[in-house]
Amino acid sequence: MSERILDEVDRQIIEHLSRDARLSNREIADSLGLVEGTVRGRIKRLQSDNIIKIMAIADTRVMTGHANPMMAYLGIHANLDTLRETAEVIADLSFVRFAATMLGRYEILAISFFGSNDEMIECINRDIISIPGVKHVDTKLAIKNVKYDYRWGRIIKK
């Protein structure tokens, strides 16, 4: 994809879809004073350029099967010589929702949701600590989400 600058119409379409991706092209066009075909074409181009992806966002309580899932930030200390491979193994774990290599205090950050402390401890001890290259895991629990905007997610090509 070549770097493309979004104009104001693209931004307004994205904002409408961010609030409700079920809006029809006609509804968006009417609210922006555009022709439906213009909106349809721009959405198609935004999708083909991997600028937007229209998808369902599930409630974490439903997806985890827990009424009040705990969000855990796992700061993973790992060997630098196998960092990429270690991070990929961690990213493939079913309970990991986000994984990235980092600069700073730890080499890998993973974000997960758990139903209990026992579940979290079991997953860390059974699944993460046993991965070759992992030295230590620092765990931090989110106790109250002040803001969570699902729209910040990045489109990832697999």
Image (tube, rainbow, N blue to C red):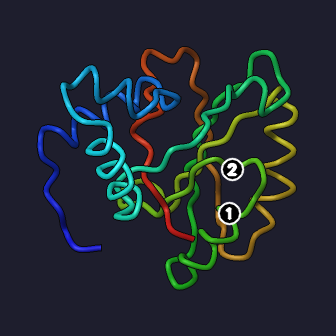
| Residue located 39% across and 61% down the image | 50
> Given the image, on which type of amino acid does mark 1 rest?
Ile
| Residue located 52% across and 85% down the image | 81
Q: Residue 31 carries which label?
A: none
Q: Mark 1 points at which residue?
A: 90
| Residue located 12% across and 46% down the image | 7
- Front in this rendered view, residue 113 or 121: 113
Q: Which mark is residue 96?
A: 2
Q: In which quarter of the image is the C terminus?
A: bottom right
Mark closer to the chain start, 1 or 2: 1
> Given the image, on which type of amino acid does mark 2 rest?
Val
From mark 1 to mark 2, how far is it between C-alphas? 7 Å
- Front in this rendered view, residue 121 or 42: 42
Q: Marks 2 and 1: in contact by CB < 8 Å?
A: yes
Which type of secondary structure does the marked residue at label 2 adopt? strand
Instruction: Reply above or below: 60 against 105.
Output: above
Q: How crowded is mark 1: few (under 14 residues within 10 Å), some or many (20 or more)?
A: many
